[in-house]
Amino acid sequence: MSLRPEIHFSSVFDHCSLNNNFQCFQGNPLNRLNLHRKSLQDIVQHSQSRFLPYRQLKVLFNQEKKQPVWLTHQFLFDNNNNEHKLTVDQCELVLLGISSQSMVDRSSVATSEPTKIDSETLSKFFLASEPAPDEYIYFALSVPPSFADKLPGTYMDLRPLLPQLSVIDAAVCGQGRALLDWHESNQYCGKCGSPTISLEGGTRRKCTKCNHTLYPRTDPVAITLVIHSDKEHILLGRKPSFPPSMYTCLAGFIEPGESIPEACSREVWEESGVVVNTNQTHYFDSQPWPFLGGQLMIGCYAYATDETITLHDSELEDCRWFSRNEIADMIQRSRNINLDKNDQNLRIPPPIAIAHQLIYNWYSKI
């Protein structure tokens, strides 16, 4: 994907608010170099390599510039000012890809003209392994908790940080977090219990004993907005752990051997007792979600055939039908970035969640 400053450097919160067909964590412009990852050791020390540190999955962030902190190999590993020197072997390292240097050097960004995608750009995207003079090679790395680093910035949780991030920063930070989380959870082989090692830029791990290969996983989640037969009400629920007065679409993991419409139907019935027609389940959009192990949220619309609500278990604290007028007020409150967290008025998730986009798209179009 070509870098488009007028999109990638805008606020992800604002961009999602203005574009209901765009989801937070989409818009990643990196060439992920899947064909060239075996040469990782040759490019780690490249003068055009840049590294984004994480610590216990918290990303290093410059609060003044409101940007993640990208560092050179020399600064991280050859800085003799550190009493205890950090080494590459101490860190979990993943190759994210190649893209424009303006991801780091924002001062030279021009916003007037979008970058056009042509055949030459596409060819380069798929085939190039060496960065152009105006590109960097981007890595994410996990700094060990025991290492007392003095890196410039503050380690911050990504999720509450999202309203401060640009489109590109959200996408790339999400990619790095998801991969590092997977590596942290797969240090040992699931077959024989032996240690595993990272290979090919962090795109896989291999058991040191039985040679079993592990690949990064993404768990598919069906998130469904159920529409009443009168088309003027939608079904939303809330869990006890949600912020006060927040309601959202019903969601759950897609099980083995299950289609997307079947997963939507099962999850909706299990949580609410409402029955939907699987033949009238329509795909809306998908959203990478780099939390809870790494998920892909698959947004769908479904139409109820039996609208009686029966809470079958304790997963939901409440579930109800909301009118179009109620939803209008809930949308407005969810778009107020300065809303008091203890506000007791009803609301839905913010625009950076696909649930918001499902609801807003229904409200504005259906």
Image (spheres, rainbow, N blue to C red):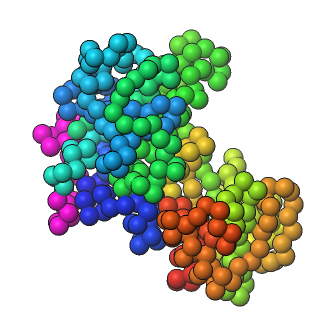
Instruction: Please tell me which residue lies in front, 138 or 333.
Output: 333
Quarter residue 234 falls in: bottom right
Residue 129 is a magenta residue: yes
Identify the residue at horizontal 76%, vertical 56% (top origin): 240
Residue 5 percent coordinates (x, y)? 25, 59
Which residue is at 69% across, 46% downward? 256
Question: Closer to the camera, 268 or 173?
Answer: 173
> Which quadrant does the N terminus fall into?
bottom left
Q: Is residue 35 left or right of residue 268?
A: left
Where the C terminus falls, by quadrant? bottom right
Q: Quadrant of residue 244?
A: bottom right
Q: Measuring from the top left, give residue 165's x and y in whole percent.
A: 39, 53
Q: Which residues are magenta?
A: 110-135
Nearest the viewer among 264 and 80 is 80
Q: Position of residue 79 (x, y in %)?
A: 26, 19
> Hey, which quadrant is residue 9 in on the image?
bottom left
User: Is 58 positioned to the left or the right of 122 in the image?
Assistant: right
Q: Is residue 278 magenta?
A: no
Residue 3 lies, with reference to residue 34, above or below; the image says: below
Looking at the magenta stretch, what is its main secondary structure?
Answer: loop
What's the residue at 59%, 40% (across, down)?
293
Q: Is residue 220 left or right of residue 98?
A: right
Vertical relation: 121 (above or below) 213: below
- Residue 83 screen position, x and y as percent: 35, 12
User: 3 and 57: which one is in front?
Assistant: 57
Q: Is residue 130 visible?
A: yes
Left or right relative to 156: residue 262: right
Q: Can see residue 126? A: no
